[in-house]
Image (tube, rainbow, N blue to C red):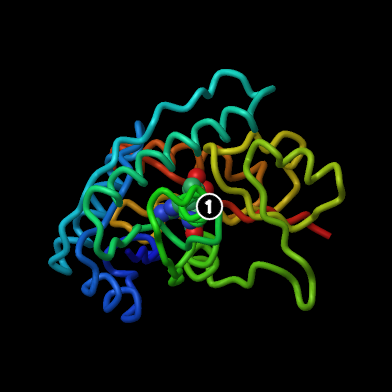
Amino acid sequence: MRVRILGIGMGPRHLTPEVADALRGCDYAVAARKRDDDGLLALRRAVCDAHGVPLVVVPDPERDRDDPADYRAAVAAWHEARVAAYERVLGERGGTAAFLVWGDPSLYDSTVRIVERIVERGAVPVEYDVLPGISAPQLLAARHRIVLHGVGRPVHLTPARRLSEAVDAGQDNIVVMLGGRPAFDGLEEWSVWWGANLGTDTEELVAGRVGDVLPAIDAARARARDRAGWVMDTALLRRTP
Ligand SMILES: C[S@@+](CC[C@H](N)C(=O)[O-])C[C@H]1O[C@@H](n2cnc3c(N)ncnc32)[C@H](O)[C@@H]1O
């Protein structure tokens, strides 16, 4: 049995020829139905339809989001439940399965870890490979026509909930993902390049001094959510010299 972990970028127009070929060679594709991403599921379905591959939807196990103190344990339990759910589908169907990953599998996505775990558990013998896709930070940079970092300088990537920790540690060029718009408290003088629903027809972009553009970001975020029924945003924050 074979699993192909395929990065599909931000939707049907982003599939690389390599990923499209791989998808067409699969017997079926597997995607999770998450509580809050039915819009993304529709996009995955469009990708499968365009390539004539049936989509098997796996209901995502509920995740306990109420106790941030036990965040790691909650995520571990949720991952194990997801592993079991995917393992069941693979065991029942066999063949070659595509796991469709939004963006690129290397960035804030658990699919690679889930498949590693399926291999470790050994109940279903699986070989797998990973093909890359276009990630949200890449698309953000392209849309704003910027480089993510200064010449020869680092860039730091973080979930929004760890932004203040990154700032306190002295990071001054930060890509923020996951968890909605960060508070930006104390960052009013920084520059921001922000984007929501990148790559889709509800894309929104805002750039400027944080203190000046916060209302524009909030308005654009609300607009994206109204139009698409979901919103995901990514921002580059840079301390101004
Ligand atoms: C679970 S992570 C997946 C990241 C994905 N693997 C990638 O390569 O970009 C979801 C986060 O990615 C960012 N993201 C994903 N799709 C996006 C989009 N179309 N526009 C803006 N940000 C997006 C948001 O920060 C969102 O909270």
Q: Position of residue 59 (x, y in %)?
A: 30, 35
Q: Which image quadrant: the N terminus?
A: bottom left
**67, above or below 153, in the image:** above
Residue at 62% from the left image edge and 29% from the top image edge = 73
Q: Position of residue 89 (x, y in %)?
A: 28, 46
Residue at 21% from the left image edge and 73% from the top image edge = 24
Q: What type is the residue that disc 1 sits on?
A: Glu
**135, above or below 123, in the image:** below
**127, above or below 220, in the image:** below
Examine the image and state in which quarter residue 16 appears.
Answer: bottom left
Viewer-proximal residue among 115 and 139 = 115
Q: Which residue is mark 1?
A: 120
Label 1 crowd (10 A; few <14 / some 14-19 / many >=20): few
Viewer-proximal residue among 180 and 221 = 180
Q: Is residue 164 left or right of residue 97?
A: right
Q: Position of residue 33 (x, y in %)?
A: 30, 39
